[in-house]
Amino acid sequence: MTVPAADPTPVIAIRGLHKSYGDLDVLKGIDVTALPGQVISLIGSSGSGKSTLLRCCNLLEDSQQGDIIFEGEPVRWKGTGLNRYPADKAQVVRIRTNLSMVFQSFNLWSHMTVLQNVMEAPLTVLKQNRDQVEARARALLDKVGIGDKADVYPAQMSGGQQQRAAIARALCMEPRALLFDEPTSALDPELEQEVVRVIKALAEEGRTMLIVTHDMRLAADVSDHAIFLHQGLIEEQGPPDAVFGAPQSARLKQFLRATEPA
């Protein structure tokens, strides 16, 4: 984990964010700041708004109120309330390419080899040189421990290998931050540890990351800051030693007891 420099511009700043699906309020005024090199874990029970917050951050979901600021640049909006949407498509593309997301379900293209999966976005979205992209992609596959799988298809790999390929794909965009949405929840415990080791290594490199996770050990080990969401609000937050070691709210205490290994 890296200690951010004094008073840096946040990579991501979320202020007063509200998100609704019709009459259902999922996020009810959330503030989150991710500084360069900071790892933030988002924890909470199902339905607390964790994944929705991540998707709003990456502009995969439209929020109804509040600000999303990427490296000092606010997202520009049109409309209000349920009719609010981003005003500048080019800005959305630019922000998304700098906030690479890793999903629970891998989302690899089945008709492409692993190497082709990793190379696709830099080639088609960023229009980068093919030789340079391929060299970077192969180095990243080596980095996550599956360099020997470059020419196989996702269906020929284990879930842990597929998720590591998805992480390499996200890294190949050279993003300013990585967003992980339950990166290990679809894996059995043995394969989960393959992915956890990669995430820990990224944290040690000083990567800016927001991690939605059910794995309290992972959250405690890699985070600089942990946020506990409950019913669309931040119930408690702080350094992981405090959040996991000395929780204050009754709801967080109950949640942590429920997530302890049997």
Image: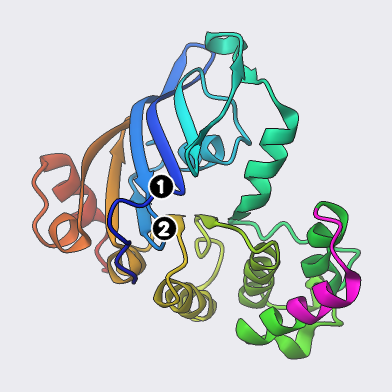
Measuring from the top left, give residue 42's x and y in whole percent: 36, 49
Query: Which numbered disc covers residue 239?
Result: none
Residue 109 visible in image: no
**Kind of residue at badge 1:** Pro
- For the residue pair 150 and 138, the one nearer the viewer reads as 138
The answer to the question of whether label 1 and label 2 lie on touching residues, with beta carbons closer than 8 A, is yes
The correct choice, above or below, for 63 with respect to 242 in the image is above
- Residue drawn at 79 percent across, 71 percent down: 154
Q: In what quadrant of the picture does the N terminus appear?
A: bottom left
Q: In what quadrant of the picture does the C terminus appear?
A: bottom left
* Magenta highlight: main SS: helix
Q: Label 1: which residue?
A: 10
- Residue drawn at 56 percent across, 39 percent down: 55
Alpha-carbon span between mark 1 and mark 2: 6 Å
For residue 186: magenta? no
The correct choice, above or below, for 30 with respect to 145 in the image is above
| Secondary structure type for disc 2 | loop
For residue 133: magenta? yes
Measuring from the top left, give residue 75's x and y in whole percent: 56, 29
Measuring from the top left, give residue 178's x and y in whole percent: 54, 58
**Kind of residue at badge 2:** Pro
Please state the extent of the stretch shown in magenta in the rendering: 126-137
- Residue 172: image quadrant is bottom right
Compared across the picture, whether 155 is left or right of 39 comes to: right
Question: Pointer 2: residues within 10 angstroms few (<14), some, or many (20+)?
Answer: many
Q: Label 2: which residue?
A: 36
